[in-house]
Image (tube, rainbow, N blue to C red):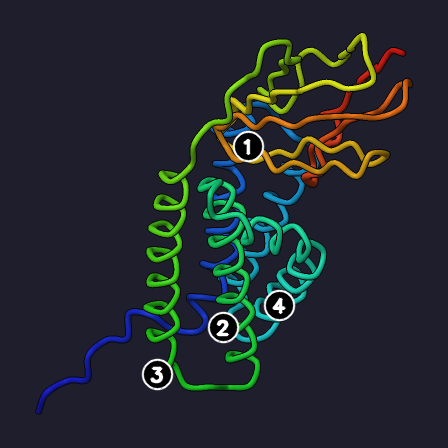
Amino acid sequence: MSEEPIQRWSWPRLVWLAPVALGATFLFVMVVVFREVEPFLVTIIVILFVAGYVGRRFPRRAGPITVLVILLLLFLLNLVSLIEDLAHPESALNFVVFGVIPLTLLLTGIIASIAVLTSRSDGAAPVVVYAAAIILVVGAVVGIIAALGLEDDTAVAGDIQIVAEDVEFSPEALSAAGGSAGVLVDNKDPIRHTFTIEALNIDIELPANTARRVDVSAAPGIYEFRCTVPGHDNMKGTLTLGS
């Protein structure tokens, strides 16, 4: 009499794996991308690892409830930024690491938690794993193809040039003698930024490792520019247009 094959993937296993994998993703982002300790991100990582521990230690009730609540809150609080990152596949790192991977892991953990709490059989758990793997692979391919299709804008004589690097603009103070100027922004980071002057309705997308040019024409004055990507609050400066 043959024995039934051991189920490799189960809902309880996915309950704790999803937050742990998401915490590891954010740890990668902090160490490799930002290359500095971000207190808020550290807090999120710790919460996710603790949720994973609770999910594994208490697999039938307290664990799934804890993971479900935490992942739902993260999903709702980050929905806008998730949508923004998924809308820009040309910035492959943002698209995959900040968009595709978190969304896939959030949904996997949420589905698994609900399945455990509603006493669903483990039969569909492998399907969810395979679907998640396919989504991750397809997402990576889409991001790479979109990034390879990018081309840099080139500077025109007289342009003001500014660099976005290490999540900062340099220089932070720009000036032009007349009421108009060409600005070339070179994004040297592996993540997306924007060059936004809200007072002039200018909002230029800066894909990762790409230069973009914009013509600015306005009345003399001082105009603030910034990056509108969530978490990039320090990326700001001023553009002074003379008479």
- The image quarter containing residue 74 is bottom right
**Marks 1 and 2, Cα distance to the nearest angstrom?**
27 Å
Q: Residue at x 61, y 43 (%)?
A: 46
Disc with the residue nearer the chain's start (4 vs 2): 4
- The image quarter containing residue 11 is bottom left
Residue 155 lies, in percent from the top left, at: 55, 17
The secondary structure type at the circle numbered 3 is helix
Three-letter residue code for mark 4:
Leu
Question: Circle 1 is placed at which residue position?
Answer: 30
**Marks 4 and 2, Cα distance to the nearest angstrom?**
9 Å
Q: Residue at x 64, y 9 (%)?
A: 158
The secondary structure type at the circle numbered 1 is helix
Question: Circle 4 is placed at which residue position?
Answer: 68
Q: Residue at x 53, y 66 (%)?
A: 107
**Marks 4 and 1, Cα distance to the nearest angstrom?**
24 Å
Residue 145 lies, in percent from the top left, at: 35, 46
